[in-house]
Image: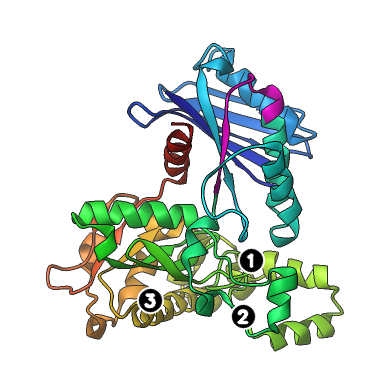
């Protein structure tokens, strides 16, 4: 059974075609620069590739090209879209409307689009991709949506509410939603399986670290708190995002620069984080390289991230009344040994001790990096959001 997984951004459309008989990836690619000039990169399981500049005025043209490269030409893998059993879509924001995987209808698409204010960069793009997909799919092929926020709907009210007047929650839906839920759900279950334990018996802190990062407390398989908030801007320092900031500092800086609300949002979302602190780059690899050469601001950016993650681990252990494991995932979490070492350093009192040599020599593989006498296990767990979306889609259509 073939499942197509689609992850639409504001100007991109990533995809994977999976064979769910063995969960193998048949083909994957990305249509990017949608609305600008357009480009598609596509590769198959057996090494065939297709790259081309294209005209992608909207997501519809991008999806039509996706169908074309899957079904025709030297890098095709199927004869027609009728071979696909279903399409699964990743959706960033489901708010309190969608707390689980959902079958797509016109009403569902409209509701996703209506929530664009809560995720302006993502939700409208998701709706465009859903409508584009519907136009080119054969009749009867179902679509399924999997929401990043759904996993965090188990957070208690005391964890997701802000100290604003309650009417702002009732009238404008202002609360902590959390993100990266698809990833946190996948890796926490994968960790439980690797440990040979029932996830219901585990207290886990999941650290999804990349250009965007979030830390989640997973108690018995359920999210009970997470670092990202109303939007993905909250939490720890990120590539170009501030992470948590005193709201008064925001209004103070806005006044000093003479920014509008939109300009201030742009400043915090796209000009801050690693980039703003270091003045070098938003990429952790560049920050690490500069820090190794003694650049003080790069060292500061690295230390800030590690320190903030450490604080979340401690606070979430307190929230869960215990801690069995810490996991690292995402581009930084899986590959940056320096970050993992910095986070876990001086945590022996907390029951965390890592094998520094194993940590340094490991990249992107499922492995335990804590010492045998560490009371809290520390793992690297590669994430696979696309596989989880495909599994959810398969379960839904069955």
Magenta stretch, residue numbers: 134-146
Label 3: which residue? 313
Rounded to the nearest whole Å, what is the CA distance between mark 3 and mark 2?
Answer: 21 Å
- In what element is the residue under mark 1? loop
- Mark 1 surroundings: few (<14), some (14-19) or many (≥20) residues within 10 A: some
Nearer the observer, disc 1 or disc 2? 2
Q: Disc 1 marks which residue?
A: 231
Location of residue 371 with respect to 103 vertically, above or below: below
Q: Horizontal and vertical percent for residue 26?
A: 44, 25
First-in-chain label (1 vs 2):
2
Q: Quadrant of residue 332?
A: bottom left
Q: Earlier in the sequence, mark 3 or mark 2?
A: 2
Tell me the residue at 71%/45% (across/down): 125
Judge whether residue 342 is colored magenta.
no
Distance (Cα) linking label 1 and label 3: 21 Å
Q: Say left or right for 256 vs 288.
A: right
Question: Going from the N terminus, do you reach mark 1 or mark 3 first?
Answer: 1
**Quarter of the image where one finds residue 115:** bottom right
Residue bearing the label numbered 2: 162
Residue 141 forms part of the magenta stretch: yes
């Amino acid at each position: 059974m073939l499942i197509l997984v689609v992850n639409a951004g504001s100007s991109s459309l990533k995809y994977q075609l999976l064979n769910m008989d063995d969960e193998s990836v048949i083909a994957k690619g990305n249509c990017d620069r949608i609305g600008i000039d357009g480009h598609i990169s596509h590769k198959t399981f057996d090494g065939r590739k297709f790259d081309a500049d294209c005209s992608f005025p909207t997501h519809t043209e991008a999806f039509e090209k996706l169908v074309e490269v899957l079904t025709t030409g030297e890098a095709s893998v199927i004869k027609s879209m009728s071979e696909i059993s279903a399409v699964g879509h990743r959706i960033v924001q489901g708010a309190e409307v969608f707390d689980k995987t959902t079958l797509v209808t016109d009403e569902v698409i409209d509701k996703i689009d209506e929530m664009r204010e809560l995720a302006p960069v993502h939700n409208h793009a998701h709706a465009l991709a859903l409508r584009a997909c519907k136009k080119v799919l054969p009749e009867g092929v179902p679509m399924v949506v999997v929401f990043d926020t759904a996993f965090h709907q188990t957070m208690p009210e005391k964890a997701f509410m802000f100290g604003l007047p309650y009417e702002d929650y009732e009238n404008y839906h202002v609360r902590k939603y959390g993100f990266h839920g698809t990833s946190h759900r996948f890796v926490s279950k994968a960790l439980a399986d690797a440990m040979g334990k029932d996830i219901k018996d585990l207290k886990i802190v999941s650290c999804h670290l990349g250009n965007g990062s979030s830390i989640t407390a997973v108690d018995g398989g359920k999210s009970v708190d997470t670092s990202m908030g109303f939007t993905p801007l909250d939490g720890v320092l990120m590539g170009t995002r501030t992470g948590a900031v005193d709201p008064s500092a925001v209004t103070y800086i806005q006044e000093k620069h003479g920014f509008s609300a939109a300009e201030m949002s742009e400043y915090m979302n796209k000009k801050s984080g690693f980039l703003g602190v270091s003045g070098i780059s938003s990429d952790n690899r560049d920050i690490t390289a500069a820090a190794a050469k003694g650049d003080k601001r790069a060292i500061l950016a690295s230390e800030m991230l590690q320190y903030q993650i450490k604080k979340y681990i401690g606070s979430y252990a307190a929230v869960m009344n215990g801690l069995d494991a810490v996991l690292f995932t995402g581009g930084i979490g899986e590959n940056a040994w320096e970050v993992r070492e910095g986070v876990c350093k001086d945590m022996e009192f907390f029951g965390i001790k890592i094998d520094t040599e194993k940590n340094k020599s490991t990249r992107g593989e499922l492995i335990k990096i804590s010492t045998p006498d560490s009371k809290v296990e520390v793992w690297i767990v590669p994430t696979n959001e696309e596989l989880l979306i495909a599994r959810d889609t398969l379960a839904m259509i069955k």
